[in-house]
Image (cartoon, rainbow, N blue to C red):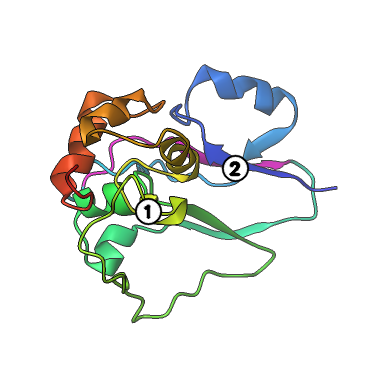
């Protein structure tokens, strides 16, 4: 049965850590050497940490590949992309003659929420996800840790350093407590 291994491995494609995969008959399904991490500097993608590997000898044939550089495609800056979407751009492969087709007019749709800020003591977890550096598990931890006396106390949540809490505060998305 064919298998594909894909992910953000935090290792460059030439790292020795991938040698074992080669010995197991696995090869890179996607390679072009361009970076996939979104830098804080506009139009810069410094590291190639996102990879796809395919078991050799399968019936799957990679017929196209690429990187979806969504910040440029959607006309957003790198800071917005990193804070609101991801600090990586997706890599993709097409198999057995397929290709990636995106509409020419694909755009980022702004949120229709009417709240002026997100109250960390009352907002549901899915709304907390809109804060910088907060995903599903951190949103759950914020809900579980209520009540919070200030935004600064969010450093008690695993993964929210002083710098990340400052990003949340300076984003203007969270209500002051």
Which residue is depicted at the point 63% across and 70% down?
A: 98
x then y, percent, for residue 60: 74, 55
Q: Is 29 rendered above or below residue 69? A: above
- Magenta-drawn segment: 44-55
Q: Nearer the viewer, residue 126 or 79?
A: 126
- For residue 64, what is the image quadrant? bottom right
Q: Which mark is residue 6?
A: 2
x then y, percent, for residue 105: 33, 81
Q: Secondary structure at mark 1?
A: loop
Residue that badge 1 annotates: 123
Is 170 situated left or right of 58 in this image?
left
- For residue 76, what is the image quadrant? bottom left
Examine the rendering and report whether any part of residue 26 can be seen.
yes
Which residue is depicted at the point 23% across and 49% down?
A: 174
Q: How far is mark 1 from mark 2, CA to CA?
A: 34 Å
x then y, percent, for residue 44: 22, 44
- Observer-side mark, 1 or 2, equals 1
Q: Residues within 10 Å of mark 2 (few under 14, many from 20)?
A: some
Q: Residues within 10 Å of mark 1 (few under 14, many from 20)?
A: some
Quadrant of the image containing the C terminus: top left
Q: Is 21 rendered above or below residue 78? A: above
Whether the residues at callouts 1 and 2 have beta carbons within 8 Å, the answer is no
């Amino acid at each position: 049965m064919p298998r594909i291994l894909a992910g953000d491995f935090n290792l460059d494609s030439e790292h020795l850590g991938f040698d074992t995969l080669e010995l197991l008959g696995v090869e890179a399904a996607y390679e072009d050497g361009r970076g996939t991490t979104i830098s804080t500097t506009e139009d810069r993608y410094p590291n190639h940490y996102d990879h796809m590997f395919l078991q050799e000898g399968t019936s799957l044939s990679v017929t196209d590949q690429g990187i979806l550089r969504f910040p440029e495609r959607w006309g957003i800056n790198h800071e917005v992309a990193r804070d609101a979407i991801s600090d990586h751009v997706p890599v993709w492969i097409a198999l057995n003659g397929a290709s990636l087709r995106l509409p020419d007019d694909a755009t980022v749709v702004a949120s229709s929420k009417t709240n002026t800020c997100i109250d960390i003591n009352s907002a549901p977890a899915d709304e907390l996800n809109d804060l910088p550096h907060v995903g599903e598990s951190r949103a759950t931890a914020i809900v579980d840790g209520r009540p919070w006396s200030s935004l600064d106390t969010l450093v008690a949540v695993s993964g929210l350093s002083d710098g990340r809490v400052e990003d949340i505060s300076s984003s203007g998305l969270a209500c002051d407590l």
